[in-house]
Each structure stands twice: as C-alpha cells, then as structure tokens.
Amino acid sequence: MDTLKICHLYPDTLNLYGDRGNILCMKKRMEWRGLPVEIAEISVGEHFDPYDYDIYFIGGGQDFEQEVLLKDLAGEKGTAIKRAVDEEKVFLTICGGYQILGNYYKTWDGVQCDFLGAIDVYTVGEKKRMVGDFMFRLSEEDGGSIVTGFENHSGKTYLGKDVRPLGKILRGHGNNGEDGTEGARFKNVFASYSHGPLLPKNPKLCDFILKTALARKDPNISLKALDDTFENRAAAFMEKRLSAE
Ligand code: GLN
C-alpha cells in the first residue's frame, strides 16, 4: 500500500478546540494497523500541488482569522484547493474551515467574505451564537452512526441543491438551527460544525474517511478492526447525556 498523504492546511491559523486532534487520530489509526501515513503542513504563502495529497484537513477559526486568510485564499492556494475538491480528493473541514469552502460568509457585523465556492453552500452570521455539545446521525451513505461533538458558531450555513447534509441533527443546532441538517457532503468533501475534536470522539467516522481515501488507491482495501472500547464508552456517555436534555 502506498503511503497515505494527509495535508493539514493552515494549522497555525485554523485550529480551534483541538481540531488538530483529527490529524492525530487519522495518523494513529493508520499506524495502529501498520499502514504508512505522512502528514504535511501548509500555511499562508506556501504553495501545494493538489495532486500531492490524499486527504486535506482544514480546522475552525474565528471570523478574524477567516478574514486574515482571504488574501491567501484569493491566490494560487484557493485555485489549488478547488482543483483538489474537483479531483475528488478527500477533505475534512470543520466550522470556519467548512465555511471557507463555501461561496461566501457574511459576518453578523456586516463583513462580506467571498470564499472559494468549492462547494455550493453559503453562510450568514447572527449575533446570537450556537454553542454547546450536540449530536447528529450520519446519513446512511456515510455509515448512519451517531456522532457527538461540540459546536460554537455564529454562522448559519445553507446548502445548495447538489450538496447533501452530512447528517441530521438529534440535539443542538448544526448548519443553521432551522432545517435540521448538519454539515455537508459533496464529492469526497466531509464538512461539519463539530469540534471536539470530531474524529477521536467518533472513530467510525474516522475510519469511513480513511477508507474513502484509501479506496482511491486500492478499491479492495479493508481496514482491520481496532479496539475502540474507550472511545465507544465515551460516545455512549455523551449520547445518554444529550438524549436526556
Ligand atoms: N467564525 C465562524 C463562526 O463563528 C466559525 C467559528 C468556528 O470555527 N468555531 O461562525
């Protein structure tokens, strides 16, 4: 098996609530299975070739950091990210990173951020933030399991017709607190409002994402089961707590 190459975009600018833990989780779950994996970090002013990596990760950030990145995204970097999405590279993007892939974000105080338009979603900020532990069920196509996480955003995201939600909200707000959707799926993009970080708390989703990327190298790939006793116990605890709310 070829090395799985993971690219962490803007690790120093977009890394809220330990979002970097998603990278560590993917790396560990590969290593525990004896599968080769490499991590690269690409930040402001650094270029990358969209064909060089199998998985791209973008974490969350405040409105301020997103505004700071506008210039960098408007150049070669934005073109490379869009190309990678079009070429069906796997993306995992969280909150501010999710919003950046969309068409635009209008902040609650009126700043218009024109983003990449790599996926057909848009975001409008509201002064009242959506904050707290939350829970959603992944769509059947993505494994159908329950995901627990933590959200903290002012942006309300709305999906275009070719983008389907990552899941359906069971507790909390998700995309906008209105239509019961959470996150987005388009080609091999997985986008979510879930910090937490998302993958260590939800190993089934981590494996689903790894498998999506590995299947592009070897369609017959199967991932050996790991001992997720502790992760499953933690998830069951959160599910119970949130269900009781
Ligand atoms: N700045 C965005 C918002 O508040 C994203 C925040 C985040 O990444 N947690 O909607």
Image (tube, grey):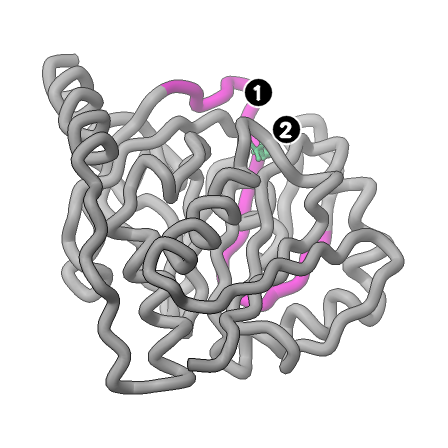
Circle 2: element type: loop
Quarter of the rendering containing residue 227? top left
Circle 1: element type: strand
Quadrant that contains the C terminus: top left
Q: Are marks 2 and 1 in contact (CB under 8 Å)?
A: yes
- The answer to whether 228 appears left or right of 51 in the picture is left
Judge whether residue 162 is colored magenta.
Answer: no
Quadrant that contains the N terminus: bottom left
Judge whether residue 126 is colored magenta.
Answer: yes
- The answer to whether 115 appears left or right of 223 in the picture is right
Residue at the front extreme of this rendering: 34
For image coordinates 43% across by 20% down, the residue present is 131
**Relative image position of residue 7 (x, y in whole percent):** 62, 61
Q: Check disc 1 and report the residue beneath it.
A: 127
For image coordinates 75% across by 57% down, the residue present is 42
The correct choice, above or below, for 52 with respect to 26 in the image is below
**Relative image position of residue 84 (x, y in whole percent):** 60, 75
Looking at the rendered structure, the kind of residue marked 1 is Lys
Label 1 Cα neighbours within 10 Å, binned few <14 / some 14-19 / many ≥20: few
For image coordinates 44% across by 53% down, the residue present is 26
Q: CA distance from mark 2 to mark 1?
A: 5 Å
Looking at the rendered structure, the kind of residue marked 2 is Trp
Highlighted magenta segment, given as a residue range: 114-132
